[in-house]
Image (cartoon, grey):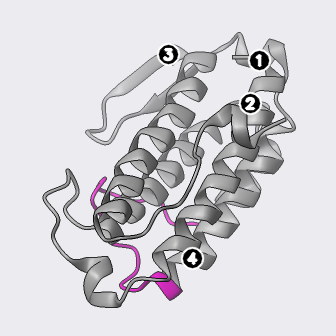
Amino acid sequence: MTPQTTIRMASYNSQMNQRLYDAATSLSAQDLHQERGAFFGSLFKTMMHIAVGDTVWLHRFAQHPDAHALREEIGVFAKPHALDQQLFGTLAELAPYRRKLDLIIIDWAATLTAEQLGQTLRYSNMAGQNMEKDFALLVTHFFNHQTHHRGQASTLLYQAGVDIGVTDLLALVS
């Protein structure tokens, strides 16, 4: 993970989230919330999990000694207590939250340096255990987690008759 890769992944993340949310708006609330046998059940719950996961990780990343701006930006978002927490009940409520998260991620990615990525981050996991991990690996996991669950979401959309089109990183980020 390099600062340039982080910037590219933040851009890709934002583009794909916009595409996902645009496609999801074509579904009825019933279709959006329909249990489809996915890991988080419905498309809506899968989208919610991505937002919850991002919020949790951004709170952790804000503990980095050099993350002054991120601490300020993410500080207005409550830290979720569970990975399946339902922050909102509708897509109309979730979408602006997602857009704000994506802007925070883009701003944060632009501040990262190779020196920072080479450091260790200390944080507490959801069970309250103290962790210490390579910061670059954690950032890689952060972006991989988003991509993994967006892949699930795009499959759920496709099963509902909505094709979000090309999702390949190389096709979307220059």
Mark 4 and mark 1 in contact? Answer it, CB < 8 Å. no
Q: Which is more N-terminal, label 1 or label 4? A: 1
Which residue in the structure is indicated by mark 3?
133
Return the residue nearer the eye: 126 or 24: 24
Q: Which residue is mark 1?
A: 2
Q: Amino acid at mark 3?
A: Lys
Q: Quadrant of the C terminus?
A: top right
* Residue type, numbered disc 4: Ala
Q: Between residues 94 and 78, which one lies in front from this camera angle? A: 94
Please tell me which residue lies in front, 35 or 87.
35
Is residue 159 shown above or below 132?
below
Above-or-below relation of 14 to 19: above
Mark 1, secondary structure of its residue: loop
Residue drawn at x 72%, y 17% as measured from the top left: 117
Q: Position of residue 60 (x, y in %)?
A: 54, 39
Q: Which residue is mark 4?
A: 95
Q: Amino acid at mark 2?
A: Thr
Tell me the amino acid under the disc marked 1: Thr
Q: CA distance from mark 3 to mark 1?
A: 16 Å
Q: Is residue 101 left or right of residue 24?
A: right
Residue wearing tag 2: 6
Residue found 64% across the figure and 47% down from its top: 13
Give the extent of the magenta segment.
75-92
Q: Are the residues tagged 3 and 1 within 8 Å (C-beta)? A: no
Q: Secondary structure at mark 3?
A: strand
Q: Earlier in the sequence, mark 2 or mark 3?
A: 2
Crowdedness of circle 4 by 10 Å Cα count: few (<14), some, many (20+)? many
Q: Residue at x 53, y 60 (%)?
A: 164
Number of residues whose C-alpha sits closer than 10 Å to that of mark 2, classed few (under 14), some (14–19) or many (20 or more): many
Above or below: residue 69 compared with residue 2:
below
